[in-house]
Image: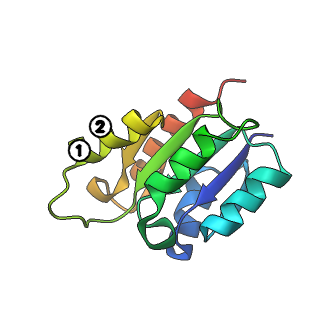
Amino acid sequence: MKKVLVADVPQMDARYSAALAGWDIEFARTMRQARQALAEARYDLVAIGVYFDDSQMFDLVRAVRGDARHGEVPIVCVRTRPGFAAVTTRTLETTVKELGAERLVDLAALGDDAAGEGTLRAAAESLVRG
């Protein structure tokens, strides 16, 4: 079974659970919880929401990439709701890739439905082989 660490706000749990049904999902709400989870377990994927722990997504991407155990684990960053009016999706995508994440999925641009969840699942599946 594939194991994923999801670092995001609790309001998105149902959406991640639906998109990643069949995966072993562990949720982290704070940077401290995420770092502890990374220290205690091995993950096949790390998913980080833009609004994670008061918008610490970039910091967690850096922490994962700097971690000897998870430095090569794929990271998908997820924009779950509109916001950052001055920041375009393209800017977020460029920034997360510069920091070492593989992909940005913009769920804010998709419906809160099976199609949006399918997009997240497809991105996760493409990053985690096997």
> Which residue sits at x=52%, y=62%?
15
Residue 45: x and y in percent read 64, 41
> Which residue sits at x=40%, y=49%?
115
Where residue 85 sits, quadrant-wise, is bottom left
Q: The residue under label 2 is which amino acid type?
A: Thr
Q: How many marks?
A: 2
Disc 1 + disc 2, Cβ < 8 Å: yes
| Residue 49 drawn above or below residue 70 | below
In the picture of the structure, the residue carrying the numbered disc 2 is: 94
Quarter that holds the N terminus:
top right
Q: Nearer the viewer, residue 33 or 120?
A: 33
Q: Residue furthest top?
A: 130
Q: Is 85 on the left-hand or right-hand side of 37? A: left
Circle 1 packing at 10 Å, graded few (<14), some (14-19), many (20+), is few
Residue 100 shows which numbered tag?
A: none
Residue 39: x and y in percent read 80, 52
The Cα–Cα distance between marks 1 and 2, rounded to whole angstroms, is 5 Å
In the picture of the structure, the residue carrying the numbered disc 1 is: 91
Q: Nearer the viewer, residue 43 or 68?
A: 68
Where residue 68 sits, quadrant-wise, is top right
Residue 104: x and y in percent read 39, 42
Q: Is 67 on the left-hand or right-hand side of 48? A: right
Quarter that holds the C terminus:
top right
Q: The residue under label 1 is which amino acid type?
A: Thr
Q: Is 27 on the left-hand or right-hand side of 12? A: right
Q: Secondary structure at mark 2?
A: helix
| Residue 31 drawn above or below residue 63 | below
Circle 2 packing at 10 Å, graded few (<14), some (14-19), many (20+), is some
Q: Nearer the viewer, residue 9 or 70?
A: 70
